[in-house]
Image: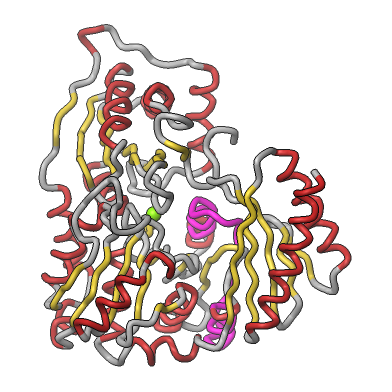
Amino acid sequence: MEVFGSSGTRGVANDELTPAFVLRVAKAAGTAWGVDRVAIARDTRYTGRMLADAAASGLASTGTDVDRLGVVPTPGAQFYAEREGVPVIVVTASHNPPQYNGIKLVGSDGVELAVSDLERIEEALLAESYTDAPWDETGRVREVEGVTTDYVDALLAAVDREAIADADLTVALDPGHGAGSLTSPEFFRELGCRVVTVNGQPDGHFPGRDPEPVPENLEDLGRLVRATDADVGIAHDGDADRAIFFDENGEYVEGDATLAALAAAELEEGDTTVSAVNVSQRLVDVVDDVGADLELTPIGSTNIITRIEELEANGRRVPIAGEGNGGIFFPGYRLSRDGAFTAARFLELVAERPVSEIAAPYDDYANVRRNIEYESTAERDAMLDAAANHAHSADADLNTRDGYRLDYGDAWVLARPSGTEPLVRIYAEARDVDRANGLAEEMYETLLDARDEA
Ligand code: MG
């Protein structure tokens, strides 16, 4: 797919991602869907309203009525889609920096569109073959109020409120000025937690921190945990489909450790879990201990969703799936990532024992991530060729499902181009930090040389 990559369409707003482009995507989606009504939601980004307005015009021009939901977390928009049986266009760039925006398309079942559906829309877009309604049959646009409240109510009904409330937890929350600012503080309060926040006001300029919940953006949250003696710190990305945690000492917990801990609580013998090709050894070890199966897909939530659907259609139980970036699926709840729901499931564990103890079994693994920027496709291709050559000369098993993953037995390293930014990402993991650093550095130097020669 040229237009819809692994994470929908994203780019710098009003430069790569213009209102004119969003209007065409909306016309193509309205045409391909051919339904009476479509909803539009957005995260808090400054350019969100401008782009959502363009999407509304595009949809209405195809004769589709439009429900404007306003600022809603992506999982809240998915909740609305499922409840109302309408597709949704979500204007969000998830964890990307403030100047970015993007589009995510959700089907009337509340699930992100499968590749085959995206291809149908992309066809209409590239052929510019749109339904153009006569003036008196263009769609009506209406504002829908209260979606965030209904979404929080649905969350509350789906988790073990009593266990969490009985534990009298203090939650330090960093919604990062994103869409979760409107829902997560209320949600955790309703769960009976004492809630203290940082970056808690919705603000599309993201003055306190960038939307990506990585340690370098979350130092304030660590301090807040310590200052308020909180039991746990919780951070979301810009559209609140992800949750990242801090322990009671204000220490960052690796997303891979969280996924492993939640998987250990959810998985039973014979179950299957699905993750991406950059999966941590931590999850591999949990799956081995339990006697479950692990399936790997190319990186990107669409691939994971597709695989979960295939497995469930074949009668397999998939209670949990996801990636180590805090984006976790609980398919028994919904086939979507939900930062608030993930956090509540984690709080069910925190009600039993401190976060540091929950994370302890998954502590002694070292993850290294590095990025190399490129300025041209020639530079990118030279780097990927170099990664392939490096893989073939290394004493490792090669997996080319998505990028180049080299498994050395005690460690692994992966090089793959980002789907959304001009970067090649390098991941490495081992129990020994020097080993992980060494493998990442070796790959980094190889790619850097190739890029500089290109
Ligand atoms: Mg997100």
Question: Is residue 71 shown above or below 432?
Answer: above
On the picture, is 137 further left or further right than 325?
left
Task: Give how far across and how far down residue 383 sits, in percent.
Answer: 75, 51
**355 or 108: nearer the eye?**
355
- Seen at 38% across and 92% down, the residue is 357
Task: Give how far across and how far down residue 452 sits, in percent.
Answer: 77, 49
On the picture, is 419 further left or further right than 13?
right
**330 or 199: nearer the eye?**
199
Question: Is residue 134 shown above or below 44?
Answer: above
- Seen at 43% across and 25% down, the residue is 21
Q: Which residues are magenta?
A: 283-308
Image quadrant of residue 211? bottom left
Quarter, ligand 1: bottom left
Question: Is residue 247 shown above or below 97?
Answer: below
Q: Quadrant of the N terminus?
A: top right
Question: Is residue 104 shown above or below 265?
Answer: above
On the picture, is 47 further left or further right than 327?
left
- Seen at 55% across and 41% down, the residue is 5
* Magenta highlight on residue 288: yes
Magenta segment, prevailing SS (helix, strand or loop): helix
**146 or 245: nearer the eye?**
245
On the picture, is 126 further left or further right than 33?
right
* Residue 362 visible within the image: yes
Task: Give how far across and how far down residue 400 sits, in percent.
Answer: 73, 58
**295 or 6: nearer the eye?**
6
